Image: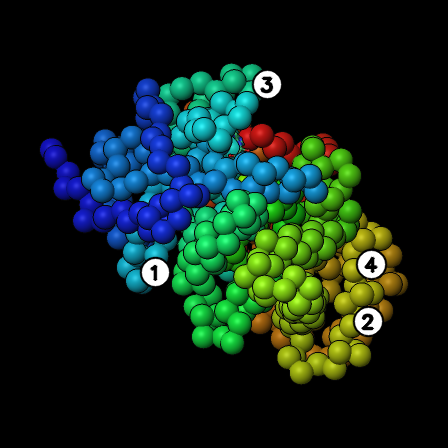
Amino acid sequence: MTVAPPRTVLDNRFARELPELALPWRAEEAPRPRLLVLNDALATELGLDPAWLRSDDGVGLLVGTAVPGGATPVAQAYAGHQFGGYSPRLGDGRALLLGELVDTGGRLRDLHLKGSGRTPFARGGDGLAAVGPMLREYVISEAMHALGIPTTRSLAVVATGREVRRETLLPGAVLARVASSHLRVGSFQYARATDDVELLRRLADHAIARHHPAAADADHPYLALFEAVVAAQAELVARWMLVGFVHGVMNTDNMTISGETIDYGPCAFMEAFDPATVYSSIDSGGRYAYGNQPLAAEWNLARLAEALLPLIDEEQERAVELAVASLGTFRPRYNAAWLAGMRAKLGLPDGLDEAVAGPLFEELQELLHKDHVDHTSFFRTLGAAARGDAEPTRLLFLDLAAIDDWLARWRAIGPDADAMDRVNPIYIPRNHLVEEALDAATAGDLQPLEKLLEVVSAPFDERPGLERYAAPAPQDFGVYRTFCGT
Ligand code: AMP
Ligand code: MG
């Protein structure tokens, strides 16, 4: 039976408007493509028929070997600071932007592939990706979306039938990813480094049109663009902090202009609360530790400001002055977002006096840290505590006198338990469950992955029989390490 092709047309707006940043390229053939997981709901949202995506032609689109006529797949050029060191030419070494499509809500979305073969930006890399890490991005990005956190989405993972050499030989895969765009801080750094101010301006105009259209009407559109990115990132990183998400590799090439979380490499969710939490094996200095993420974001935004300087004012000194003032909005915005989020997590009223809330939050963090309390379990059990049963919360602590004292002061404010359950997830993609699901999938059994996806796709709804998905890792799971170069 032949299946009707999708009505969808892939636009090539990025390639057309910014050819200097777009290198037309093709995906490598996949010897034996096999669809491992498809996001039916997202496909439908994109106007793509899930049944068609399961056909040979559909899978061909998902690995980039059968793109619709008129599409211009490109590898995107970008630069980036990686762990503080500047690389003038990174770019998509193993990824392709297939093009943009307009979803059923009228929004423009990028369809992008990761693991689709070497490009001229590959440097020493093989251009490939293994099944495990691509499924990892799929699960974690979809969990983040379900948590209400802005993120790129995952449409599908297709096993290619090609082996990938890492420490061992692993089955290869391509991830089909969807984003409101793939513009990064590093895209601006790259454009800036060309010394072509008109290119930089075109890039900024493209970013304004796609993500921050209000900036176009501001007195100073490019400064307004910068401030809009500052605001989006302040909000985003606060959201990460509130769920205990550790991105792991906040390089400037992994920070979007849209404010979506991108590039799920060595990321993980923190269990025992500790600001120094690091999972990535290469982050030995703890640059991207949980508690450093707001600072890392601010540092990246300073790099964006530098890239934008020629657009901000012709006179460099004046441009710097304006950019510094705008960057100064990051901290108050981050603090406001974090405080509002904490108030919601603790079920406290919006108007609560900061002089009451501030010390309560600070003390709580000290208690969580001192007793190595599981971050997610703590906030979730607090719902029961608000209803009068503090035992599940108390069980998480060693210093009972201290937590009892804190609980008494918190309960006196009258927390709203139902509101808390709507913002404190019970199910997150816990590291041991992710590893278990990926190991099984790599060995050919997709069932644990499908189950995990189902669980984390409704993170706030407690369901019977899912107790193991709510529990922290068993002691014998040991110290969790994640790997880059995935
Ligand atoms: P990431 O750590 O995934 O953000 O990637 C950083 C840079 O390395 C980007 O330019 C990637 O395209 C490139 N890269 C990562 N892995 C590979 C690979 N296996 N082959 C080619 N390039 C890669
Ligand atoms: Mg990246």
| x and y percentages locating residue 160 in the rendered image | 37, 25
- Residue at which label 1 appears: 107
Picture quadrant of ligand 2: top right
Q: Tell me the quarter of the picture where residue 90 sits.
A: top right
Earlier sequence position, callout 1 versus callout 4: 1
Q: Is residue 134 above or below residue 377?
A: above
Q: Nearer the viewer, mark 3 or mark 4?
A: 3
The three-letter amino acid code for the residue at tag 3 is Glu
Q: CA distance from mark 2 to mark 3?
A: 48 Å
Q: CA distance from mark 3 to mark 4?
A: 40 Å
Earlier sequence position, callout 3 versus callout 4: 3
The three-letter amino acid code for the residue at tag 1 is Arg
Whether residue 431 is visible here, answered yes or no, is no
Earlier sequence position, callout 2 versus callout 4: 2
The three-letter amino acid code for the residue at tag 2 is Pro
Q: Which mark is residue 167?
A: 3
Are the residues tagged 3 and 4 within 8 Å (C-beta)? no
| x and y percentages locating residue 34 in the rendered image | 33, 28
Q: Helix, strand, or loop for circle 3?
A: loop
Q: Nearer the viewer, mark 3 or mark 1?
A: 1
Q: Residue furthest left?
A: 1
Q: CA distance from mark 1 to mark 2?
A: 42 Å
